[in-house]
Amino acid sequence: MVVRRHNDLANILSGANHLLRAFRAVWNFVRRTHDLPESPTNVIEWFDEEQDGHIISDLIAQRRQVDDILNLIHRTFYEIILYTGLRKSEAPVIPPESNWLRK
């Protein structure tokens, strides 16, 4: 089912990947407290995404956009990548027990 849905969304490759990665994150979060099998997204062959090479030229304007994000978790995520230089794909895989932000 998730493979079919991923393929149905193939007209926007990054959108398909991001949607099902978010699904996987929620699944894995719930799995910690409930008896669920492995995430069904484990069978997906992710689409290759080409980076647009966009560089932030106006950091103040970018910061204002981040400040306008209503969802606190999303806002914090974008603050971290904005100030650390991490890629969006790198930030979610940092283990929570890592102390790298406190250094």
Image (cartoon, grey):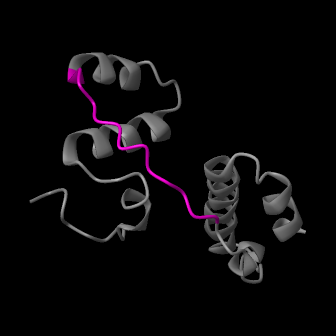
Q: Is residue 84 above or below residue 35?
A: above
Q: How many marks?
A: 0
Q: Is residue 101 above or below residue 40?
A: above
Residue at left offset 63%, top offset 60%:
21
Residue bounds of the magenta highlight: 47-59
Residue at left offset 37%, top offset 58%:
91
Residue at left offset 77%, top offset 78%:
36
Name the spot of residue 5 as percent of width and height, x first. Answer: 85, 59
Name the spot of residue 73 as percent of width and height, x first. Answer: 47, 41
Q: Is residue 16 left or right of residue 89?
A: right
Give the dominant element type of the magenta stretch: helix, strand or loop: loop
Q: Is residue 94 magenta?
A: no
Residue at left offset 18%, top offset 64%:
100
Q: Is residue 3 left or right of residue 85?
A: right
Name the spot of residue 60 as percent of width and height, x first. Answer: 23, 18
Among the 4 quarters of the image, the one containing residue 96: bottom left
Q: Give whichever of 23, 30 is nearer the camera.
A: 23
User: Quadrant where the C terminus lies?
Assistant: bottom left
Q: Is residue 50 magenta?
A: yes
Q: Is residue 6 left or right of residue 12?
A: right
Q: Give whichever of 54, 95 is nearer the camera.
A: 54
User: Quadrant where the N terminus lies?
Assistant: bottom right
Among the 4 quarters of the image, the one containing residue 38: bottom right
